[in-house]
Image: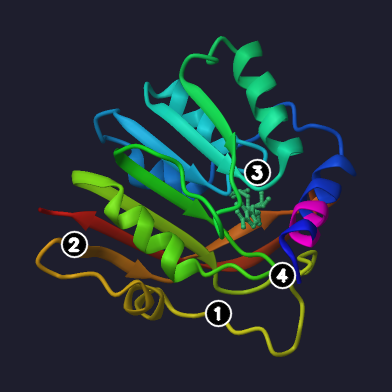
Amino acid sequence: MSTTDAVTFWDDLYAARPAAGDPQPNARLTETVEGLPPGDALDLGCGDGGDALWLAGQGWRVTAADISAVAVERLTDLARSRGLGDRVIAQRHDLHESFPRGGFDLICAHYLHTPFDLDRATVLRSAAHALRRGGRLLVVDHGSAAPWSWNQGPDVRYPSPREVAAGIDLDPATWTVERADAPRRIATGPGGRTAEVTDHVLLIRRTA
Ligand SMILES: C[S@@+](CC[C@H](N)C(=O)[O-])C[C@H]1O[C@@H](n2cnc3c(N)ncnc32)[C@H](O)[C@@H]1O
């Protein structure tokens, strides 16, 4: 499947629903970042922008990237309307083809899953290299499918955080795994429906 298919898929998904007025941050982000000094952050596959807006509100300068121009434009408008336009730069990137420039203290990728070709190991390796010394890469993946997810195939496999780390294949002299676990949480879906889901959480720190 082509990049055009992926762009159309994600643009259509966002365009089919009203812009989120108050997107919320992901729980794994808030629990990880609480207490860290603000710096430069990068959000990969930012979607509605709940994570980027929350980080900006905590004093971070945020670059937020997504393949969907609809998502990027909506986040730009929302950040401006909240007076955070100078702290959130939303950029359209197909991470299969391009990666945001710069060095970062925090890079997060929450549920960066897609039914199209995306070499996540290469994207996450680029992210690890884009960290400044002391910076952290937080990768949060689905460890189970919520009943409302598009990703319901019977053959869907959820690589463990350790498997994701092995795929990124980083030199332990420069990067260290700080967290690799599979916590559960109650997720809220369309119409306020709730279900228990599993997250696969990987936190890597650049030490040199
Ligand atoms: C499941 S959503 C997660 C959104 C957001 N991080 C969150 O936690 O709600 C996956 C996001 O990745 C984006 N995405 C998918 N493929 C991408 C690609 N190749 N490059 C950049 N973004 C992509 C989608 O547009 C979508 O916003």
Label 3 near ligand 1 (CB < 8 Å):
yes
The reply to whether discs 1 and 4 touch (Cβ–Cβ < 8 Å) is: no
The residues tagged by marks 3 and 1 sit, at their Cα atoms, a distance apart of: 21 Å
**Tag 4: residue type?**
Pro
186 relative to 107, above or below: below
Instruction: Categorize mark 3 by other alpha carbons within 10 Å: few (<14), some (14-19), many (20+).
Output: many
Identify the element where label 3 is drawn: loop
The residue identified by callout 4 is 115
Q: Residue at x 51, y 24 (%)?
A: 88
Query: Which residue type does callout 1 highlight?
Result: Tyr
Q: Residue at x 57, y 59 (%)?
A: 112
**Marked residue nearer the N-terminal end (2 or 1):** 1
Q: Residue furthest bottom?
A: 155
Cα separation, mark 4 vs mark 2, equals: 29 Å
Q: Give the image quarter of residue 6.
A: bottom right
- Ligand 1 within 8 Å of the CB at mark 1: no
Q: Are marks 4 and 3 in contact (CB under 8 Å)?
A: no
Nearest to viewer (mark 2 / mark 1): 2
Examine the rendered structure and indicate whether residue 203 appears above or below residue 66: below
In x, y percent, where is residue 15? 86, 40
Residue range (magenta): 5-9
User: Is mark 2 in CB contact (under 8 Å) with mark 1?
Assistant: no
